[in-house]
Image (spheres, rainbow, N blue to C red):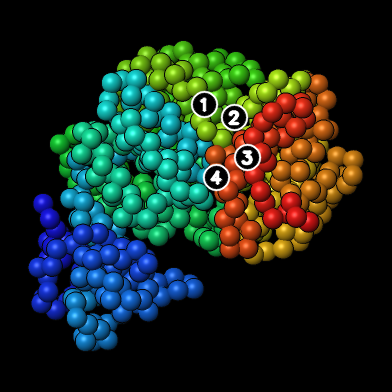
Amino acid sequence: MKKTVKNILFDLPTAWEAEIEGFNAVVTSIEYDSREIKKGSLFVALSGKSFDGHAFIPEAISKGAVAVVGSQPLSLWEHLSVPYIHVADTRIALAWISASFYDFPAHEMVVIGVTGTDGKTTTANLIYQILRTNGIHAGMISTVNAQIGDEVLDTGFHVTTPEAPAIQGYLKKMVNADITHVVLETTSHGLAQDRVVGCEYDIGVVTNITHEHLDFHGDYKNYLAAKAKMLQMLANTRAKSSGEIRLSVLNKDDISFEPLNALIETKKVDYSLSSPADVWAENILQSSTGSIFQACGKDFKVDIETNLPGDYNISNCLAAIAATVLGLGIDPQIAAKGVAELKAVPGRMEKIELGQPFQAIVDFAHTPNALERSLETTRKMTNGRVIAVFGSAGLRDRQKRRMMAAVSARLADITILTAEDPRTESLDDILLEMENAAVKEGAILGENLFSVPDRGMAIEKALLLANDDDLVVSCGKGHEQSMCFGETEYLWDDRTAMRSALAKYLGIPGPKMPYLPTQDK
C-alpha cells in the first residue's frame, strides 16, 4: 500500500502538531539527509552538536520533499509550501516514521537484540547460526553486513547500528522474504540516538559493558544507561503472533550484571563461565583452534565444540545458548550443532595463512578489554612470542589509548603502535601518548616497543621480527573496510594488508598493500 503523509503520521505513538493541508501527498522515502531527497520524500530535520537539519528545509523542499518534520515551533515554518510537522524529538520521530512507512515490520518477526562492548558480532552470528540449524528462516543485521535469506548486503565502512530508515528497510525486506526471526546487533550509539526505536525486541542479550565510547557518552554510567535502553524497551514490545517472550539475557561475570539486573522489569536469565547461573560452562578444554566444554542448565547438559578460541568466546557461546534454548525453546543438541557449524566470524581472530612459519591473525579487538582478551587468547595459541600491532582512534576516548598500550606492554612480547583512524588528530601525538603509557608499564622503546605510523609498514615490521612459532596479531580494524585520515576514508582491509605483507615476506605473488597517506612520509 502506498503511504501518504496522513497514513504515516496517524500511525505514530508520539505527539505531533501540524496544519492538515497537504497530508494526502504520497511518500516515496524517508530521508534525514537533504542530499538524498527525491520527489516524494518526507524530510526529517535532525539536529546535532555541529549541524542543524532545519537549515536544509528549503533545499529539501526544492528537491521534491512533500513534508517536513522538525523540532522547531510550527509558527516558524507556516510559510512552507508543504506540511511542516512539529515534534518534540526528531530522532524518535524518525524511528517511528520509518517503522510506519515500512508497515512496522518488526511486529511480524521475533527480534533478538545483541548489545555489549565486545563480542556483539560473534554472539549475533552464533545465534543466527543456531536459528538456521534449527530450520528457522532467520535474518541478521550486524556491523559487518545484513543477511536476508541468501542475500548479503554491505552495511557500510565504519558502521554502527544503521540509522532508522535503513534498519526498518532491512526489516521490511526480511518480512517480504518470509523471514520469521531476526538477530539485530545493537550498538550504544544506535540506542542513545534512538535509531532502534520501533524495533520491538523480544529478546535482549548483553555480552559485557566495559571501557569504550566514553568520548560520546561522557562516563561509564551514561554508557551503561544507553545499553540498558535495549532491555528496557522489551517492556514496550506489543503482543505478537509469535507469542509472549520478552526476555533479557545477562552476563553474570561482567561488571554490568548487578546494575542491569536491578533495572530490568521483564523476565531475565543469566549465563556464566561457572555456576551458579541459568546457563554455565563445565569441563572446559581450550586449544589454538577453539574450545570444547559442556553447556549446562537446570534441565540440560550438552557437549559444545566451537571453532572460536578463548574464554570470551565460550562466554559468547553461552549467551547464544541462553537466548535460543531458554528464550526460544530450541533443543540444546540443536544449539550445540549450530555453535559447531559457525567456522569463523570475519575479522575476529581470523587466521591468515600463506605458508609462513608463524601464525598471523587479524582481530577486531579495539577496546582495552578486547585487547586484553585477545592477547590472553593468542598467548595460549603459541609456544613462541606474541607480537601485537594496533593503534587507537583519533577524536575518540583518549583514556582508552593509554589503557590499551599498557595492556599490550604487559601481555605481548613485542608491541608495534600504528595508525587506526586518526581522523583530524595528529597521529604522531596519538602514538606518543601510547608510547609513554607503554614505557610507563615497562616496555623499552626500540627493543620490545616500536611506533610505525604507516599501518602496512607496521604489519610488515611485525612479520620481519617474527621467529618460527611466533604469533603476529593485528588488532583494531578486523572486518572494517576503510581508515579515516583527516575527513577522508581510505579503502583499507587489515586482512588484505596482512596477505600483502606475508606475500612480500615470502617472496610470492599477493595482493597490493592498500594505500594510506602515511606511505608518502
In contact (CB < 8 Å): disc 1 and disc 3: no
Residue at mark 2 to residue at mark 4: CA–CA distance: 15 Å
Dot placed on the residue nearer the N-terminal end, 2 or 1: 1
Residue located beneath label 4 in the image? 481
Residue type marked 4: Gln
Residue 178 drawn at (x, y percent): 21, 33
Callout 3 secondary element: helix
- Residue density around tag 3, few if under 14, some if 14–19, many if 20 or more, within 10 Å: many
Dot placed on the residue nearer the N-terminal end, 4 or 3: 4
Callout 1 secondary element: loop
Q: Quadrant of residue 81?
A: bottom left
Nearer the observer, disc 4 or disc 1? 4
Q: Can you tell which mark lies on residue 190?
A: none
Residue located beneath label 1 in the image? 344
Q: Residue at x 74, y 39 (%)?
A: 459
Which of 315/507 is in front?
A: 507
- Residue density around tag 4, few if under 14, some if 14–19, many if 20 or more, within 10 Å: some
Q: Is residue 348 left or right of residue 442?
A: left
Residue located beneath label 2 in the image? 350
Dot placed on the residue nearer the N-terminal end, 3 or 2: 2
Q: Residue at x 76, y 47 (%)?
A: 417
Callout 4 secondary element: loop
Nearer the observer, disc 1 or disc 3? 3
Dot placed on the residue nearer the N-terminal end, 2 or 4: 2
Residue 65 drawn at (x, y percent): 24, 70
Q: Is residue 191 above or below residue 132?
A: below
Q: Residue at x 72, y 58 (%)?
A: 427
Residue located beneath label 3 in the image? 494
In contact (CB < 8 Å): disc 3 and disc 2: no
Residue 136 drawn at (x, y percent): 27, 25
Q: Quadrant of residue 333?
A: top left
Residue at mark 4 to residue at mark 1: CA–CA distance: 18 Å
